[in-house]
């Protein structure tokens, strides 16, 4: 999985965790390319919305998490994705070794 795809999955996870549709729309509208950019947009929205957003969030059925609260989960997600990348790479190497062309004597190496 490329880093571009990893970032997209991380941003999608962040947006699913936010629960406030106005914040999600704001971040999606800006189309961030990295998770750091998405977190910056989240913090910017919180600063711009001020106390008005907090009163709306308090009436929400789902909690709104700050970037500081979700950072450990994002780091854990990145760690899992890196582990998956290592696994995919190992699988690719095994498949490539298994499907190598036969040597001159007709036997696989």
Image: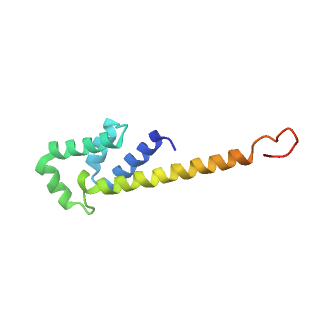
Residue extending farthest left: 51
Viewer-nearest residue: 96 or 40: 96
Identified at 38% across, 52% down, the residue is: 13
Q: Position of residue 84 (x, y in %)?
A: 51, 53
Q: How is the image coloured?
A: rainbow
Q: Position of residue 81 (x, y in %)?
A: 46, 51
Identified at 45% across, 41% down, the residue is: 3
Is residue 49 in sight in this rendering?
yes
Viewer-nearest residue: 17 or 95: 95
Residue extending farthest right: 105
**Relative horizontal placement of residue 93, taking residue 64 as reference (left or right):** right
**Relative horizontal placement of residue 98, taking residue 92 as reference (left or right):** right
Total marks in image: 0
**Relative horizontal placement of residue 105, taking residue 54 as reference (left or right):** right
Identified at 25% across, 57% down, the residue is: 69
**Relative horizontal placement of residue 99, taking residue 84 as reference (left or right):** right
Is residue 16 in sight in this rendering?
no
Viewer-nearest residue: 1 or 49: 1
Q: Position of residue 37 (x, y in %)?
A: 30, 39
Q: Position of residue 4 (x, y in %)?
A: 45, 39
Residue extending farthest bottom: 61
Identified at 85% across, 46% down, the residue is: 107
Depicted 33 relative to depicted 80: above or below: above
């Amino acid at each position: 999985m490329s880093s571009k795809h990893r970032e997209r999955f991380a941003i999608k996870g962040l947006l699913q965790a936010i629960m406030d549709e106005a914040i999600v729309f704001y971040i999606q509208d800006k189309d961030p390319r990295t998770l750091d950019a998405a977190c910056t947009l989240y913090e910017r929205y919180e600063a711009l919305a001020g106390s008005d957003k907090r009163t709306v969030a308090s009436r929400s059925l789902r909690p709104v998490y700050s970037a500081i609260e979700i950072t450990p989960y994002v780091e854990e997600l990145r760690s899992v994705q890196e582990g998956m990348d290592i696994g995919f790479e190992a699988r690719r190497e095994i498949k490539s070794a298994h499907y190598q062309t036969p040597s001159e004597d007709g036997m696989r190496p």
